[in-house]
Image (spheres, rainbow, N blue to C red):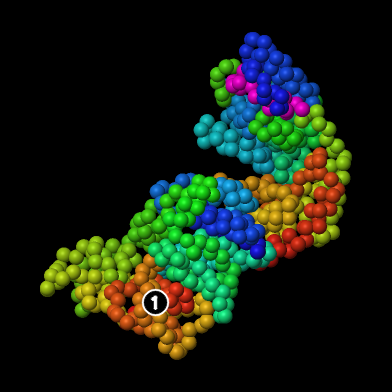
Amino acid sequence: MSEQLQQLGNPSSLHTHGRATRKTLEDAREVIAKKIDCLASEVIFTASGTEANNIALKGLFWNGKKTGKNLVVISAIEHHAILDPAHWLHTHEGAEVITVPITSDGVIDLDFLRNLVSERRFEIGVISIMHSNNETGVLQPINEIVAIAGDIPVHIDAVQSFTKTALSYKNLGVTALTLSAHKIGGPLGIGALILRRAYEIPALLHGGGQEREIRSGTLNTPSIVAFATAVKDSYDAARVSGLRDSFIAGVKRLIPDAYINGEKSARLPGIVNVTFPGTQSDTLLLLLDSAHVSASTGSACSAGVHEASHVLLAMGHSEETAQSSLRFSFGATSTQGDVDFVLSVLPDVISRGRAAHT
Amino acid sequence: MKLIAAMSGGVDSAVAAARAVEAGHDVIGVHLALAANPQKYRSGARGCCTIEDSHDARRAADVIGIPFYIWDMAEEFHDGVVEDFLAEYAAGRTPNPCLRCNEKIKFAAVLDRARAMGFDGVVTGHYARTEISDSGKTLHRAVDHSKDQSYVLSVLTIEQIAGAIFPLGDTTKVDIRIEAERRGLAVAQKPDSHDICFVPSGDNAGWLRDRLGSEVGPIVDQDGKKIGEHKGAYTYTIGQRKGLGLTVPTPDGSPRFVLKIEPVSNTIVVGAREDLAITTMSGERPVWCGPAVTDQVQQGFVQIRAHGSALPCSYYFNGTLLIATLDEPLLGLATGQAMVIYDGDRVVGSATICETK
């Protein structure tokens, strides 16, 4: 990446410098395309996963609108980068948004979706469901969703899953798919939308016509090259799952009333969402951070106040238990030593956390 | 010590946190989210609870190099401070919400939570000092008397004072701004907040009218004769002269002042300036910031407004009420305000004024 930062050529220029940059850029595109199992021409680079989600949801909606389709279908556990554009489409474009509910195991209710599609097939412009949830790690049944959808365009947010679990754009048969570099160890601020080659959707940004005229703007070659480099890094899913399972066993041993959210479902290797009854997650976060452990809570509102996770609420949690939950993530560089360290500080953190909320 | 620094997003609390770090403490910055629906930006110098303020606090913590968190205290603040403020006005008294916030939020909810989490105390940017003497840790006025905030801290118990750290008490405000500049804190020139933080418009009367209604009632003289009408009793204060809208003049043409607010009958009593004079005040629910006051009469000072002067008095505690007798009469004193007793610069204690004579 730092090497590429010294290259001055604009990949869209015709001169020698431009060509050199373009060569590197297209090499990177091919690496990413190969990993996600799509054509290079199906990769549209964006500045973030959020941008890719916005292009996909709004673009596919507007496409459908041309033939009178006004319905947007999402799930209750989508990231805000889908929830908020869906809300925007409702407020500004008059879209009807239907949210598919979630079971207590964290998986979308397929029967609900099946009924909805059979009743209103010709009204649905787009279905957008995430490949795996960022808070619980629970994998969603994308194959079944695509089968139910038939010829309705399906977008999946695969930001959390990419490189962590088997993921083939071609085999899934979805219309569009979102990726982000920083979730796989790449740089911040670079993402991609994978969109079927023959598909044309309205753009959000207009200008130089880059990226199939769907995403104008000079391409961020240094970040794209770094994105491709991160794709090449190996991720040992079995090893990470082992760490996760050892962590879960430790948590259950040390904090007997703690429970794992989505434990019965197929999940990503590296994410564990734990409820510690009688605590408040922002307190636990502070205490863990003081002990040099970084964990996270669902999300914060614009004022920075921790809110109950909409994902856990959708799984049937109360405000109170949702507020008592934390997400722990393990990555390619995590070790058993890290797991043991977290477990060594956890009992004290939980008991102080409980004392602070009595 | 392990300390929580309460950071409002203003210059004082930022410098206080920086000083605590410099003194060798292990400090974590916490911004208290007190409004359920905060405004995005401050307008002028009002309040301290906007999203912009929380960003300013976060930026200051980053510059100082300490962890930073936001604690949601909106519910505690609403129940303990805003509701109390409304109830007091509805009862015809004049409350001080900053004092209530220190008593119930900053040095209660926050300090309790901090202690349970293993912290030793709370750092704030208040202008006040503490001293360790034979009788324990005591609360004192700041060196900068014009900025002194010991009045609004006078509700702290000995136990709360033990957990309170005020790093700014030895410095003037002017020097704090210079120091903030030197430390690279962008809030160095941020305006002071003067108003009640949960009344962002600054229009207290309007805010109260929206919530308590504006039931018209009589304005009477001391003989009970109606001489005018008011628009909601709680928007008036004892000693107020302007804005009464009275058209009936006094026999000698002298002005009238609000003497009394009677919430039950929704009546305001007005009278001559000399009728405002009081010499004795009694306060309920006393809090001692050091050794308890006894039934032995002591000489000292009493302060009845946040930035008022300290009035020479004698005082004692009759077992229920803290009673202070002024050396010189005072004009206009509202019940509901805190009476704070000082022994020189030391805060002896405080009570809520319930009766004046």
Q: Residue at x 55, y 19 (%)?
A: A207
In reply to whether residue A224 is colored magenta, the answer given is yes
Q: Quadrant of residue A258?
A: bottom right
Q: Position of residue A114 (x, y in %)?
A: 72, 35
Residue placed farthest to the bottom in the image? Answer: B296
Position of B226 compared to B124: left or right? left
Q: Position of residue B3 (x, y in %)?
A: 62, 61
Q: Chain of mark 1?
A: B
Q: Residue at x 57, y 17 (%)?
A: A208
In reply to whether residue B22 is colored magenta, the answer given is no
Residue placed farthest to the top in the image? Answer: A15
Number of residues whose C-alpha sits closer than 10 Å to that of mark 1, classed few (under 14), some (14–19) or many (20 or more): many
Badge count: 1
Residue annotated with mark 1: B302
Q: Residue at x 79, y 53 (%)?
A: A342
Position of B229 compared to A194: left or right? left
In the image, the segment drawn in magenta is: A210-229
Judge by depth and name the residue closer to the eye, A163 or B120.
Answer: B120
Q: Is residue A249 above or below residue A158?
A: below
Q: Position of residue A211 (x, y in %)?
A: 64, 19
Quadrant containing the N terminus of chain A is top right
Q: Is residue A85 above or below residue B139?
A: above
Judge by depth and name the residue closer to the eye, A319 or A109.
Answer: A319
Q: Residue at x 79, y 44 (%)?
A: A330
Q: Quadrant of residue A148?
A: top right
Residue A262 appears anywhere in the view: no
Quadrant containing the C terminus of chain A is bottom right
